[in-house]
Every structure is written in C-alpha cells, then in structure tokens.
Image: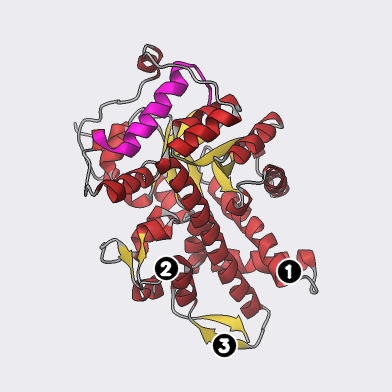
Amino acid sequence: MSRSLLEQLREMTVVVADTGDINAIETFKPQDATTNPSSITAAAQMPQYQGIVDETLLKARQDLGSKADTKAVVAHAIDQLAVAFGVRILSIIPGRVSTEVDARLSYDTAATVAKARHLIELYKAAGADPKRVLIKIAATWEGIRAAEILEKEGIHCNLTLMFGLHQAIACAEAGVTLISPFVGRILDWYKKHTGRESYPPAEDPGVQSVTQIYNYLRKYDYPTEVMGASFRNIGEIIELAGCDLLTISPALLAELQNTEGQLERKLDPEKAKKMDIPRLVMDRATFDQMHRENRMASEKLEEGIQGFSKALEVLEKLLTERLQKLEGAKETITHAAQDVFRIYDLDGDGFITREEWMGADRVFDALDTNQDGKITPEEMLVGLGAAVYLRN
C-alpha cells in the first residue's frame, strides 16, 4: 500500500509548519510551528483574525494609557499579538512555537536578551509553558552571544538566518537549542550569481549546506537541533529527509501530502559519526574571517535582517492604521498596499522580486499570483486589500 511522502517524512523528521495561519496548522497538524512578522501580518489581515488583532490593540492602549504615544502602543501590541498567536498555536500543536525577536536588534546583545525575557514573561502571563517557546534570533555573532545568555537562564532559542557552517558551529558551542539553516535563499543566491536556472535536488547548494551542518553537529555530538527552512520545492525536502526538523510552508506540506512514493532517509546521525570531518574552534576572529570569506552567507544574512526588519515595519504601519481606525480618528482612505509596495520595491522599477522581498517565502508566493517571480502593485493590492484608514 503506497503512502504519502508527508506521512513517511514524519517518521524520520519532526515536521514544523512555517505559518501563522491557525487554519493551516489545524489542517496539517505539525509537531512544532514558527511565526515571524510577515506571517503575522498576513494572518492579521484575514477576516477570521480581526477580532484577535482589534482586541490586542485596544488592550495595549489600555495597558499604556490614553496619553501614551501611538508608536509605543503599537510596539506593545506587536509583542502581545505575537504571543497571542503563539498561545493559540500551542493549543493546537503538541510541540513548540518559535517567536521572533525584533530583527532590528540583531547586532545588540543586551537589547536582544531584554526583548527575549519580555516575550517569555508575556507567555507566562498568558498561561503558556515557557519550555514550549523558542525565541527566534538572527545568527549574528551578537545574536549568538545573546542566545548563550538566554540558554543558561533556561530560555530556549531558535537561531535563524543561517547560511554558513561557521554560524552553526558558533551556535552549537554556545549551547543553542535549535538552528534554522536556510535552503531556498541559498539556492536563490547561487542561481542569481551563476546564471543557472535550476539545480538537481542533490546538487542544490542549500541542500548541501544543511547537509554539511547536520553532519558536523552529529559528528561531534552537539545536542543542538538542526531545522532546515525556506524551501523552494519538495525535491529539497526529500533530499533532507532525516534532518532533525524541517519547517515547511502549507503549500509544500499539501504537495507532500498529495504525493505518494518511497521516501529514502538521506541524513543519519550514525553515518555522520563515521565521517572524516575536521573539527573547528569558533572564536570571534575565526567567525568573522569565515563570514567575510563566504560572500553568500554575509550577503544573505544582511539581506535577511533587512527583510525581517521591513516586515516588522509593515506590521507596525498596518497596526498603527488599525488602531487609529478603532479609536475613531478622522479617517482618510488610503491604499496601504501601495505603501507596503514602496517599502519592498528597493530599486523603484515597479516590481518586487524575491530578492527584494526578503520576507516570508510563502507570503511572496501568495502575492505573486501569476507565479512569474515578481509582485506587481496590482498583485499587492489584491493580496493585502485595497483600503485602510490613516489619521489625517
């Protein structure tokens, strides 16, 4: 009797849903889930979640008082909203949810630690078990140092925007719970810089990077979990079967669920232990040198931080507008989609490419309705909705 690839994958790998959409999580029933500002932005604009958004905004205003600056209220609301979605997700899944620290703090160890502690306190106040929460932090040297501090306090971390072995080793030596090396974004970079239109799954540079990281960590018995992320196709997922975890978009989960065949385990800890892999000690100087020498990793890390930061700015803007509407400010119809478009259209050519977007891949795919690799202003308008309200 043939079985789906998703069913077989779950027998060797923990499947994580890369979405903030509660309905998608209920449908695919992953072990864990992960969210970020762009996924929360997408979910917050769905009619079924408007109640959560409005309630959170009004509570944030109540918490800070009527005279509090709108910017402060929205910042407070974003933390509360992230936790609200996280708590809802935890009520559905058996495992953990990852909640992201503001990417604009990626090079500030102290600020990252403070924000992470604040998020954990919010989870505790909401009645959630903090052991089921992973704090998601960009894998800069400063972010890794923040994670080291937090892990010693019992706050578990998910280090993201990982593109190189040096980042993975530094995280493992810091005692980080989980790392998220990116697959699809690595592939994007190589396609752009080599001119190749495609790679066979086994030769996919992103697949090879995650395989190298997995084998190194299993070779030297680091407990740090490896979670492959940012997939472009199910071929990449198939090549990483056996990885500790894989975070997969709802669209690719559906494809795996609807595809039958025999799934071979590609990554295995026992095989990794027998490999001849030289050991590296990752101090700051070595980290910086390896980062400089890896052009792809250095460019994609910086781009990723910028993209996550832009996604947060979009969420801030949308929540500001929503709060002003709720509070009965004088209303002028504007098109939020146009404002969002201008933020991401970095070169001003009238299109948003995947490289410019740098937010959640699944959100880009949803907005790119004709699947030509570009988002037009019209596609943005349809995807995000036409009109919102701004204070005059």
1 or 2: tag closer to the N-terminus: 1
Location of residue 307 with respect to 106 vertically, above or below: below
The residue sitting at 57% across, 64% down in the picture is 313
Which residue corresponds to mark 1? Answer: 61
Please identify the dominant SS of the magenta region.
Answer: helix
Q: Disc 1 versus disc 3: distance between alpha carbons?
A: 22 Å
Q: Quadrant of the C terminus?
A: bottom right
The mark lying in front, picked from 1 and 3, is: 3
Give SS at disc 3. Answer: strand
1 or 3: tag closer to the N-terminus: 1
Instruction: Mark 1 and mark 3 in contact? Answer it, CB < 8 Å.
Output: no
Which residue corresponds to mark 3? Answer: 332
Which sits in the foreground, 97 or 186?
Answer: 186
Which sits in the foreground, 221 or 59?
Answer: 221
The residue sitting at 44% across, 36% down in the picture is 293
Asked whether residue 155 appears in the rendered view, the answer is no
Q: Is residue 241 left or right of residue 136?
A: left
> Is residue 79 inside the magenta stretch?
no
Give SS at disc 1. Answer: helix
Instruction: Give the magenta range.
Output: 203-224
Q: Amino acid at mark 3?
A: Thr
